[in-house]
């Protein structure tokens, strides 16, 4: 009887240890949510898996082996939902707003990248002259009054400032198409189905490359809008999320590691914009 009891106790202890190990493993699993916003993440073609975001996540995975990493494709809207309603989700790039900061955790050192602008066809730039301010930037309040223009924007993307106000304006006459990915909008623009797109020049450059449309698109500055945006790693507000963010902050506090992390962006940014990204320091 004692032998049977001893065996039973040993089996119970083994089962409990396996459950504990399994729970610990599950607790350390980080899900990276990615959206098809090339060239950040590239899902197809010769550069598949080599978007700058693809390579930056791979870098973090290799430098943070204490976590088990997984990647899940999601729209921006879905990714924001998962961040708010799960304990182990992270997003590589997200604008920190006061509202988001109340429920999510953000890394201290942001990647400074060119903000969204108005992407138009180079051949039609003169048609926008009626909407330019004294500094040659597009005044969206003027564009909003014309019902002969149609633009496009990515759903759930925080464009901020004048663009966000333009999209939300109840009295806007210019029509706007909403899409889940920017490449769909840029292809509509290339075919003259819409007149402009709110996007970054990186996205326009990638689309020109994949569609062999060199020099077709150009970017117009928006009046009252920042030229650059700070994008940060965002994670669920949970003990695991805090651990991931703390580990990323410790890693990227090093200027050497920071430059390594930014290296995939070098092929897409202008030298001036890449230098600006490298120079960005962590928040105090």
Image (tube, grey):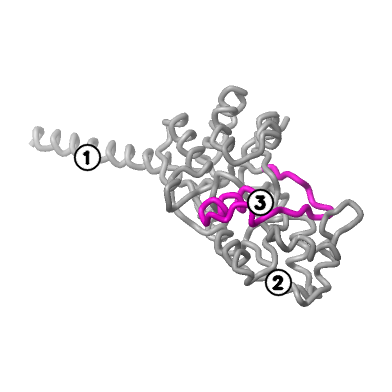
Residue 35 spot, x, y in % from top left: 51, 54
What label does residue 239 carry, if any? none
Please tell me the numbered disc located at residue 200. 3
Distance between the alpha carbons at the discs numbered 3 and 2 = 18 Å
State whether residue 73 is above or below residue 90. below
Percent position of residue 137, x then y: 83, 54
Give x and y (percent) for residue 53: 52, 43
- In the figure, 3 relative to 148: above or below? above
Magenta range: 201-230
As measured in the structure, the alpha-carbon distance from the residue carrying label 3 to the one carrying label 1 is 58 Å
Kindly report the distance in space between the C-alpha atoms of the residues bearing marks 1 and 2.
67 Å
Q: At x 89% / y 57%, what residue is drawn?
A: 133
Q: Earlier in the sequence, mark 3 or mark 1?
A: 1
Neighbourhood count class around disc 3 (C-alpha, 10 Å): few under 14, some 14–19, many 20 upward: some
Residue placed under numbered mark 1 in the picture: 12
Residue drawn at point x = 23 percent, y = 36 percent: 14
* Magenta highlight on residue 42: no
Mark 1 or mark 2: whose residue is earlier in sequence: 1
- In the image, is 108 to the left or to the right of 141? left
Is 175 on the left or on the right of 25, as rendered? right
Q: Which residue is mark 2?
A: 150
N-term mark: 3 or 2:
2
State yes or no: discs 3 and 2 in contact (Cβ < 8 Å): no
The residue sitting at 62% across, 61% down in the picture is 156
What SS does tag 2 mark? strand
Pick the residue in front: 193 or 185: 193
For discs 1 and 2, the disc positioned in front in the rendered view: 2
User: Mark 1 and mark 3 in contact (Cβ < 8 Å)?
Assistant: no
Secondary structure beneath label 1:
helix
In the rendered image, the quadrant that contains the C terminus is top right
User: Is residue 21 shown left or right of residue 110?
Assistant: left
């Amino acid at each position: 009887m004692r032998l049977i009891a001893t065996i039973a106790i040993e089996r119970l202890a083994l089962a409990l240890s396996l459950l504990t190990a399994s729970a610990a493993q599950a607790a350390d699993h980080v899900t990276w949510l990615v959206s098809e916003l090339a060239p950040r993440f590239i899902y197809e073609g010769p550069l598949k898996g080599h978007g700058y975001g693809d390579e930056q996540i791979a870098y973090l995975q290799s430098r943070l082996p204490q976590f088990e990493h997984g990647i899940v494709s999601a729209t921006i809207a879905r990714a924001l939902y998962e961040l708010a309603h799960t304990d182990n989700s992270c997003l590589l790039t997200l604008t920190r707003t006061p509202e988001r900061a109340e429920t999510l955790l953000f890394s201290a050192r942001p990647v400074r990248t060119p903000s969204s602008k108005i992407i138009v066809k180079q051949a039609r730039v003169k048609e926008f002259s009626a909407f330019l301010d004294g500094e040659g930037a597009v005044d969206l309040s003027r564009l909003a009054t014309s019902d002969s223009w149609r633009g496009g924007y990515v759903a759930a993307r925080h464009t901020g400032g004048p663009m966000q106000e333009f999209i939300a304006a109840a009295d806007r006459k210019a029509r706007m198409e909403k899409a889940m990915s920017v490449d769909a909008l840029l292809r509509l623009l290339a075919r003259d189905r819409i007149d402009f797109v709110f996007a970054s020049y990186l996205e326009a450059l990638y689309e020109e490359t994949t569609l062999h449309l060199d020099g077709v698109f150009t970017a117009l500055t928006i009046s009252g809008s920042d030229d650059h945006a700070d994008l940060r790693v965002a994670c669920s507000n949970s003990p695991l999320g805090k651990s991931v963010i703390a580990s990323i902050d410790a890693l990227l506090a090093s200027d050497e590691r920071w430059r390594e992390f930014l290296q995939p962006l070098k092929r897409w940014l202008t030298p001036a914009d890449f230098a600006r990204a490298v120079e960005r320091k962590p928040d105090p």
